Image (cartoon, rainbow, N blue to C red):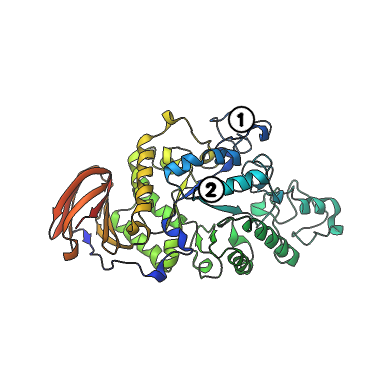
């Protein structure tokens, strides 16, 4: 069968279809699991601390903190990052901090409020935005309201904050509603107005410190009618705030303009895994899957989506590629050239590996001798291109070429700026021949990887793709 070829139909994304908030257009996010990024202040280390670089376990600590992030801002700016998403930083006893003990306090092993404000101020000075992780479905069992409830039962003023039987017991099975039945994570009762008022006070407090938005943990497990209230509050305090929900599957219900701006795009990750890492689908099927995702949402929502290769909840992408750098390089090229907001999980840019949690939460490697330099340099180059090329930020997307095996290409177009992104995930050389509209005939130059190669094309763009290659060509006129 002949490969499928599509010509570009648009040259400019309509203004009404740009992402919301507008600053997402040229943003590249970096997700940091604070406990594992860098230990900038050993004086606040919990006890005992495992030596940096050793095996992560469910309950061990390495000493990463906010001071460590502050000290590594030069690394982030050099990489080209201009937005951070931090896993929870509020007071909690665990290493992951999803078991909140106090929503209004920075976890002492991460630093204090002064350190937080210094980090926030320095990030803003460097042009880096910050969104925080909001864990509002449940608290930890050390949260002050739950501890009072444990002591006083129905005499506690907080006995309606949770759904409990009395007397309360935690073992052998909790007799109160928990997240996934885990006794240390009692679920808040959002049918109680005082719970709603309290969480909104927490949200207002941190939003007013100057953050740029929220990533919301398991929001589908909270009463859905809470989120429009949450949105109105956040957008009133910061109209440019970005609200991202952790929804793993179809998210249309959550993206109607009254709840979230975006969700973590795990369905896109699944497609990327299937095509690049596992080779379970061919280019035609990959393209059809992408088209299905774009059809599911408005273009504005598609351009606002939180696109990721992995997170603290998934195995590392390079591990899913069985350590094959070529597949990782292709996936990173796709992530940074596809519509939406690219998100890099800390360490992916240097070739870190790891299986499912807790192995995906290893300590960041700071010894450059241990980095995969090719992945690092490629990621850095792609971030630079993403921030330089309007076609990658706001351009229209059109399929250029698909095959029934592993050759795929697409256009990104904005005005006279025209880019062609090509992939070959085969072990063989693969030719492509793509018809060109009259306004695209002329000189084309390869801008990634930079080789200085240029060619003059008349009616067709013709090139032979090396095995397992990915590249970007730009129309020069």
Residue 426 vs residue 34, the one in the foreground: 34
Q: Are marks 2 and 1 in contact (CB under 8 Å)?
A: no
Q: Is residue 328 above or below residue 220?
A: above
Residue at the spot 74% in from the left edge and 47% down from the top edge: 142
Which mark, by number, is residue 123? 2
At x 53%, y 30%, the residue is 53
The answer to whether residue 358 of the structure is visible from this angle is: no
Residue 400's disc is none
Disc with the residue nearer the chain's start (2 vs 1): 1
Q: Residues within 10 Å of mark 2 (few under 14, many from 20)?
A: many
Between 28 and 121, the residue placed more toward the observer is 121
Extreme residue toward the left, this view: 458
Residue 187 left/right relative to 254 = right
Q: Position of residue 433 (x, y in %)?
A: 17, 55
Q: Position of residue 436 (x, y in %)?
A: 18, 62
Find the distance from the CA under tag 2 to the CA under tag 1. Answer: 29 Å
Nearer to the camera, 151 or 100: 100
The image quadrant of residue 305 is: bottom left
What residue is disc 1 on?
50
């Amino acid at each position: 069968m002949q490969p499928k070829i599509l010509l570009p139909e648009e040259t400019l994304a309509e203004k009404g279809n740009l992402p919301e908030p507008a600053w997402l257009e040229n943003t590249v996010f970096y997700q940091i699991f604070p406990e594992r990024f860098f230990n900038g202040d050993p004086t606040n280390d919990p006890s005992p601390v495992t030596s940096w670089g050793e095996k992560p376990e469910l309950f061990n600590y390495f000493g990463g903190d906010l001071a460590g992030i502050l000290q590594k801002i030069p690394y982030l700016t050099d990489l080209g990052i201009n937005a951070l998403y931090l896993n929870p930083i509020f007071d909690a006893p665990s290493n992951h901090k999803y078991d909140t003990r106090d929503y209004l306090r920075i976890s002492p092993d991460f630093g204090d409020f002064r350190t937080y404000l210094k980090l926030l101020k320095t990030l803003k000075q460097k042009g880096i935005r910050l969104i925080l992780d909001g864990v509002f479905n449940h608290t930890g069992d050390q949260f002050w309201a739950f501890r009072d409830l444990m002591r006083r039962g129905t005499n506690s003023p907080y006995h309606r904050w949770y759904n409990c039987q009395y007397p309360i017991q935690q073992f052998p099975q909790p007799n109160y509603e928990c997240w996934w039945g885990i006794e240390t994570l009692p679920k808040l009762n959002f049918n109680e107005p005082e719970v709603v008022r309290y969480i909104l006070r927490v949200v207002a407090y941190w939003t007013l410190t100057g953050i740029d938005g929220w990533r919301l943990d398991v929001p589908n497990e909270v009463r859905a009618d809470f989120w429009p209230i949450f949105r109105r509050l956040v957008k009133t305090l910061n109209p440019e705030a970005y609200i991202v929900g952790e929804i793993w599957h179809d998210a249309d219900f959550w993206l109607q303009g009254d709840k979230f701006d975006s969700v973590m795009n795990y369905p896109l990750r699944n497609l990327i895994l299937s095509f690049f890492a596992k080779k379970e689908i061919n280019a035609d099927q990959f393209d059809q899957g992408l088209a299905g995702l774009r059809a599911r949402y408005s273009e504005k929502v598609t351009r606002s989506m939180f696109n990721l290769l992995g997170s603290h909840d998934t195995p590392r992408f390079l591990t899913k590629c069985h350590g094959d750098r070529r597949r990782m390089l292709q996936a990173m090229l796709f992530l940074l050239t596809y519509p939406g907001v690219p998100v890099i999980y800390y360490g992916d840019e240097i070739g870190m590996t790891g299986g499912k949690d807790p192995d995906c939460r290893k300590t960041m490697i700071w010894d450059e001798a241990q980095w995969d330099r090719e992945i690092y340099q490629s990621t850095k180059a792609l971030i630079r291109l993403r921030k330089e090329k309007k076609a990658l930020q706001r351009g229209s997307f059109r399929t250029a070429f698909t095959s029934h095996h592993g050759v795929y290409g697409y256009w990104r177009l904005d005005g006279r700026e025209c880019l062609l992104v090509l992939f070959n995930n085969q072990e063989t050389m693969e030719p492509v021949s793509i018809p060109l509209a009259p306004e695209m005939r002329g000189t084309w130059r390869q801008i990634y990887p930079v080789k200085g190669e240029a060619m003059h094309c008349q009616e067709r763009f013709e090139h032979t793709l090396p095995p397992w290659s990915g590249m970007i060509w730009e129309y020069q006129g």
